[in-house]
Image (cartoon, rainbow, N blue to C red):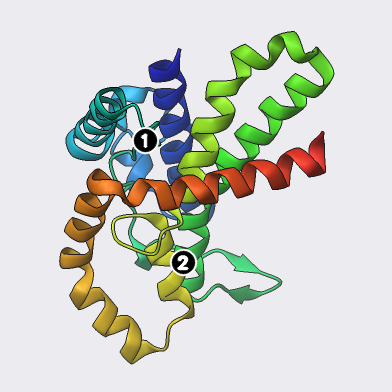
Amino acid sequence: MTLGALILAITVHEFSHVAMARFLGDKTGEQLGRLTLDPFKHIDPIWTVALPAILIVASASTGAGVPIFAAGKPSPYNPNYLKRRFFGKELATRTAECWVALAGPLSNLLFASLCLLGVKYGGYEWAGLFQPFILLNISLFVFNLIPVPPLDGAKVLLAFLPHEAARKYELLAPQLSWFLLIALIFGGGTVVGYGVRMVLWGISWLLI
């Protein structure tokens, strides 16, 4: 159940990126076959397979309840084609990229919220069914907003940084990516786990 919930959450996440890019005018992801809910189109060998496998083994061997995180294959898009106009004004490229980046985490937050409503209106006997979907989608929401490439939070951060600061940040991106991976494997996941608990508490308070 947990593996299925994780794959579904990642699939919805990556599909939402491509769908938002398509809405904003870019057909790159669609042309590459990524505008689909087929999970095999969105699997990344490191972020979808290796990372959660390592975390699952670490959790089982230590008994510490290590949070399980994963990400899909980065969704392709061409920022030059993100030309949607709103109220007669074209979105700035970095703003459009920010919306493409946010579409994934927000889809997971929406997914988790719908599952919480399922528990509320379907009765608590449904809690066991919905629990992995709720926890994994909130985990993906929090995890992907970390402002480190290739996660979505990096694009969101870049949308708000001054041009020179953004340029320097992009130069550091490769080193930051490996630092994030190593940190998660050796205990950084507990910090993200705290964020997951806070978000879960917040949406539970709002919806239930």
- Per the rendering, the mark at residue 66 is 1
Residue shown at 55% from the left, 40% from the top: 138
Residue shown at 36% from the left, 24% from the top: 39
Question: Percent x, y for residue 65?
Answer: 40, 31
Question: Percent x, y for residue 83?
Answer: 49, 66
Callout 2 secondary element: helix
Residue shown at 25% from the left, 74% from the top: 170
* Quadrant into which the N terminus falls: top left
Residue of label 2: 156
Question: Percent x, y for residue 13?
Answer: 46, 39
* Residue type pointed to by label 1: Val
Task: Kindly give the residue lying farthest to the top in the view shown.
Answer: 125
Q: Choose between 31 and 64: the one closer to the eye.
A: 64
How many numbered discs, if any? 2
Q: Can residue 93 be seen by looking at this rendering?
A: no
* Residue type pointed to by label 2: Val
Question: Percent x, y for residue 167?
Answer: 27, 83
The quadrant holding residue 38 is top left
* Quadrant into which the C terminus falls: top right
